[in-house]
Amino acid sequence: MFNTLFNWRSLLAIIAIAIVTGTVFYSNHLAKEIAADEKIKIEQWVEATKDIANPNSTESNLVSMVFTENSKAIPMVLVTENDSIIDYRNLDSVKIAEDKTYLKKKLKEFKKLNAPIVWKNPYDSLQTNRVFYGESVLLKQVRYYPIIQLFIVALFIIITLIAISTRNKSTQNQVWAGMAKETAHQLGTPLTSLQGWVEMLKETPSMEKIVPEMSKDVDRLKLVSDRFGKIGSTPQLELNNIVTLVQNMVAYIKRRSPEKVNFNIETHGETEIKAMVNGPLFDWVIENLMKNGLDAMEGKGTMTIDIKNENTQVQIDVTDTGKGISTKNIPRVFKPGFTTKKRGWGLGLTLCKRIIEQYHKGELFVKHSEPGKGTTFRIVLKK
């Protein structure tokens, strides 16, 4: 799947580069052709202006046509050798009327764009006029066309990548849901058998101490099966006391943890903090975070769960004093398959994040982690 996505990205990038490169080269070629053509038109306009001013000219109609047609699209300013403005063409007459410096600004702009066309006055050999000209609308369009096309290609690539990413996420979600439901289905048969065996053992003498513990483990397996069965379907959210849920889970984990591990629950004096959650799935998240912390502490340390009742949300911080997470690994901890353990599939935190963010519309993230000192995961639930 990831290789396919990479190939798609590479192909799109190659296509985009090819389109843009070809467009840029072709547009530059067109711009040079148009610029050269416009220069010729300005030179023709200058010559036509000379002929019109010459009373002995015999080609007045042709000269008049060249004078009129060649000055339609190209903005220009005619100045003396001292830059005194004599005439202008194709400039905004409204701006000229409103702003007295407009013509001087355009003259300064045209000087940067093109070299002037020099005009020797046929009636005054000492006077030299110059024509400075800018770019026509067509030439500007050709120059900016590659940028517009680059934007369109970039937009096309972004939309395509979003579509591919959405499709892959949808496929991935279906795979997760299918695996979870199949696991729940497979657990169903042995669980039913175990329940039957437990009932039979209850009638057996000298099994009074063993049967209750076996019943608890069977109930635990039923809970795990129920959790897997809920993945992929919309779970029912109910108003639950988060303090009670956390206390019950801590009690369960504590009985199965080394004696050198201390557990603390901080509720800031409150005994009832309610939020809309699915009990079994929320328990699963707390259990996974605590088990990760226990693995990181390697048999000794302190596990602290801090529950804060804010105005619009409930914050649960799960903190351990374990080996911590390196800075480079923090962005990867919730990705499927990522794990620093020798065994394990690296799916626990991925599922936790899905449960909190997709089903409960909350947040789960690494609030703080420091190698050698521990890690804090924060859960944010909306009230």
Image (cartoon, grey):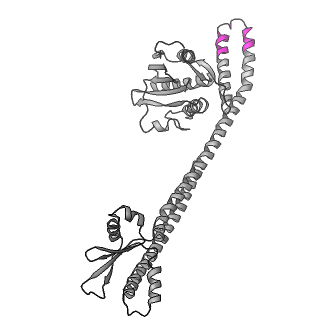
Quadrant of the drawing holding the C terminus: top right
Q: Is residue 215 magenta?
A: yes
Residue lying at 56% horizontally and 58% vertically, measured from the top left? 11
Is residue 88 positioned above or below 125 on the image?
above
Q: Quadrant of residue 372?
A: top left
Q: Nearer the viewer, residue 260 or 229?
A: 229
Q: Quadrant of residue 201?
A: top right
Point out the stretch of residues depicted in magenta: 198-216
Q: Position of residue 261 (x, y in %)?
A: 46, 17
Please give left or right for residue 58 compared with residue 160 in the image: left
Q: Position of residue 361 (x, y in %)?
A: 58, 31
Q: Quadrant of residue 49?
A: bottom left
Q: Nearer the viewer, residue 66 or 272?
A: 66
Q: Position of residue 276 (x, y in %)?
A: 60, 23
Please give left or right for residue 124 compared with residue 29 in the image: left
Q: Nearer the viewer, residue 125 or 372?
A: 125
Q: Position of residue 255 (x, y in %)?
A: 54, 14
Q: Is residue 319 magenta?
A: no
Q: Is residue 92 visible?
A: no
Please give left or right for residue 87 compared with residue 363 in the image: left
What number of labels is visible?
Answer: 0
Is residue 235 positioned above or below 24 on the image?
above
Q: What's the magenta bit mostly, secondary-structure-wise?
A: helix
Q: Residue furthest left?
A: 126
Q: Is residue 357 visible?
A: yes
Residue lying at 42% horizontally and 23% vertically, measured from the top left? 321
Is residue 121 positioned above or below 187 on the image?
below
Is residue 208 positioned above or below 41 on the image?
above
